[in-house]
Amino acid sequence: MSLLSDHRKREESVTFSSEPAGMGETHELLTLNFGPHHPATHGVLRLLVTLEGEVLRDVKPIIGYVHTGIEKTAEDKSYWKAIPVVERMDYLAYYFNAMAYCGAVETLLGLEVPPRAQYLRVIHLELNRIMSHLVWLGTSALDLGAMSMFWYCFRERETILDLFEMSSGQRMHTRYIQIGGVIEDIPAGFARKLQAFLDEMPRRADQYADLLEKNEILLGRLRDTCPLDAETLLGLGVTGPLLRAAGVPWDLRKAQPYSSYDQFDFKIPVGSVGDNYDRFRVRHAELYESVKIIQQALNGLPEGPHIVDDRKVTLPPRHELATSMEALIHHFKLVTEGFRVPEGECYYPIEGPRGEYGCFVRADGSAKPARVHMRDPSFVNLQATAPMVKDAYIADFIATLAMIDPVLGGVDR
Amino acid sequence: MSPPVAARRGGWPVPDPGGLEAIAQALREADPDCILGTTHVNGRAEIQIEPSRNVPVLEWLRDRGYTFLASLHGVDYYPHEPRLGVIYELLDMREVDRVSVKARVSTDDARIASVTFMWPGADFQEREVYDMFGVEFEGHPDLRRILMPEDYEGFPQRRDFPTGGEPVLFTHNETDGYGADR
């Protein structure tokens, strides 16, 4: 009979090979299980860590605890009914998931999204980016012992969620972005409320900086801890703020503008060393840039339709259903069968709060996608954990994990 | 604030059909059998390759500037043969240019060489394709399931794998399922 427990037998393929059991340089090595239920993992992430005293010699992420088969589920839904499930992948970046997916389907359909819809998308995408960064900042500061930051960040996040609720009726997983545009124009009063937020947000971001940047403990925890050079990051496929912190000014909003991003004036914050402090500074600076983009989009919001005027793809306006037989028929067809997409494949990459969200959609000519795959930045970026934290203190490992900002819903999908 | 020259509205720059053909031609000259075809549809430049030649082709493209592996994912073309597709989305960050490389393998002999030695970031993504489609990546340092439980049987993203066939675990039978005691 094997000495291994059932549990270990199942995981025999989890190699401990890189953990040289026995002695490290001076102390005995200890392999420890970390998570999946641990507040510092920011979700259901499990890590096998090998420690020599307090120094981390190796770390192996084990994922899949919140795998829900979203990509498989999406194959069973018609194109527009797949949007809600796709949104639930990375649950802090729902607008980005929807945008990548809708962008891919629109490309396959050859749809031209109206300018107003593109601007409305930009406003909501950037609000979502700020919201995601606020959750990151609040929880990361919490990991580093700054309790009050959490409340401040969630206070501003609340304002954003209120705005989401105003424009779409939902606070999270809003299904606002549709194939061909957005579901509804912004309601009366939205612009005023948004303006109040835009006026306040830079001031709040200044306050965060005052609280954190002059905090000796926080600076000590972040500066010069766990840097990683740009070349290694690129080899690992890392994108987003982590890559920019290492000094690579790569941002898809600038490099391959989509949804009218080429019409806005904004900067790409980059770091120099690529340590945890740079990662913190880059995301913090992005808060201001996103506010600038939203302000420009709000000021220059073009008039026109909020969704493409193609009744084969989008629902007819509600009032037409009572008077137009064709509208009623098309409404019925769209809600039951959905629309068909010509055969083809598309990979649609966009810049999300964590890096490149690339949605691959394969259409086989039917009303359901034959394959939906999301290249989620959290999933790819997670591989950079081990090279970053090798030979660092376990306390720095917690800080680094916070700065990587993985969202496990996106990792596991 | 002028948009980049290559930028198109709602899309991204890829080599034009002529450029794609030039790449394919140069690859054919290096190895006559490696290219099966090219397509240029919907702003997507794609090269279909012979799966056994994936490493030399990708190395050639990498040396030509497509240094970043943006994504690696699998597709099932059921009922068409060869059924499984492994797609490499390559990116040239200097020229801002994307090209897709597709290798099709059959389910009977679902094997292809790993590219982790070129891009360490392919590690998780190849494991995901193995987990979901059953494509074995030869030379991968640690090829095992990544999202599904270790003892899971079958490859759930294949098109002939049914949805809803999973037994529902209630309290009285909770130990019957995959990975129940972990």
Image (cartoon, rainbow, N blue to C red):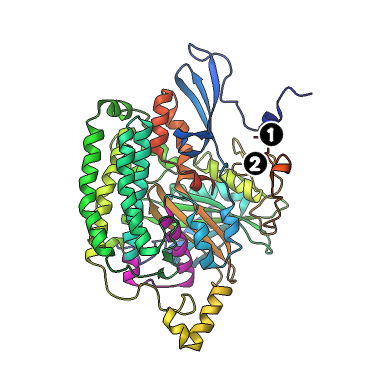
Local crowd size for mark 1, using a 10 Å CA cut-off: few (<14), some (14–19), many (≥20): some
Residue beneath disc 1: A10
Residue type at numbered disc 2: Pro
What kind of element bears circle 1? helix
Q: Residue furthest top?
A: A26
Local crowd size for mark 2, using a 10 Å CA cut-off: few (<14), some (14–19), many (≥20): some
Residue B158, picture quadrant: bottom right
Tell me, yes or no, whether the highlighted magenta stretch contains residue A117.
yes
- Can you say which quadrant of the picture contains the N terminus of chain A? top right
Residue beneath disc 2: B149
Which one is nearer the viewer's eye here, B87 or A3? A3
- Which residues fall within the magenta stretch? A93-119
Residue A316, picture quadrant: bottom left
- Which chain is mark 1 on? A
Which one is nearer the viewer's eye here, B55 or A129? A129
Residue type at numbered disc 1: Arg
Q: Is residue B108 left or right of residue A233?
A: right
Whether residue B4 is visible = no
Q: Residue at x 31, y 55 (%)?
A: A254
Cβ–Cβ under 8 Å for marks 1 and 2: yes
Whether residue B61 is visible = yes
